[in-house]
Image: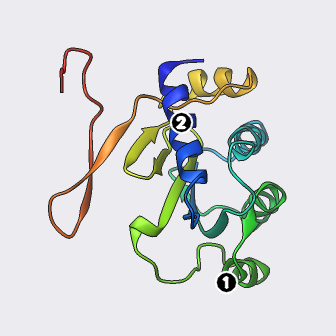
Amino acid sequence: MTDAECEFLAAVESSNGDLIPRLLSFHVCLPICTEAYLARVERELCLVARHFDRDREVFRINFDATAPGRIPPAVKSKLVCAIRTQFHFTSALHEASRNDEPGVGRCITSSDWDQLGFGVGAASRIGDRVFRNVKDLSAWERAIDRGRLTVGPAGRMVVTSRHDTIAPPASSGDRR
């Protein structure tokens, strides 16, 4: 297991230990919508889900298609079903997903939720740590096929104003 994977899992464990668990928001990156890619995203969901407590509620799902065109409704439905088998939905998201409107949720602040990113290059934010999946499609596919998480080194959320920004990971020579 890489240092980045260990850091990600430690952040998840810490987040799971919160007295009032933060909600979960999902960001699913779909640069391509092939059956093989979608199967790997579903596999990644399983790999990540086993580290989260079942009392963590999913309140929002966003789909990001970088390929031309819209994401077919059947693809969204399939991924929502895969998420539903692994995670617990809030009642607001449950109602929205029944109406084929994933992504609808209640208004909360970013400190109330953790974001999980799925797919090549996706970003996850657990507490104030930000992790990004590898951006190379082949490397991401190989990692998922081997049952490995694909997260890179963590950056930190930096609040400089009312807007959250992502600080890059410290370099190995940084002695903070």
Q: Residues within 10 Å of mark 1 (few under 14, many from 20)?
A: some
State the image quarter where residue 58 is shown. bottom right
- The amino acid type found where label 1 is placed reads Ala
Q: Earlier in the sequence, mark 1 or mark 2?
A: 2
Relative to the observer, which residue lies in front, 145 or 152? Answer: 152
Which structural element holds mark 1?
Answer: helix
- The amino acid type found where label 2 is placed reads Ala
Query: Which percent across, then down, holds residue 136?
Result: 50, 26
Q: Which residue is mark 2?
A: 10
- Mark 1 or 2: in front is 2
The residue furthest top is 173
Query: Which percent across, then down, holds residue 51?
Result: 69, 42
The residue furthest front is 19
Query: Which percent across, then down, holds residue 2?
Result: 53, 18
Judge left or right: residue 104 versus residue 47: left
Q: Which residue is mark 1?
A: 92
Residue 31 in view: no
Q: Tell me which residue sits at (47%, 83%) in the image.
A: 107
Q: Tell me which residue sits at (50%, 64%) in the image.
A: 113
State the image quarter where residue 94 is shown. bottom right
Relative to the observer, which residue lies in front, 11 or 58? Answer: 11
Q: Mark 1 to mark 2: distance in Å? A: 29 Å
Relative to the observer, which residue lies in front, 39 or 111? Answer: 111
Q: Residues within 10 Å of mark 2 (few under 14, many from 20)?
A: some
Q: Tell me which residue sits at (59%, 52%) in the image.
A: 17
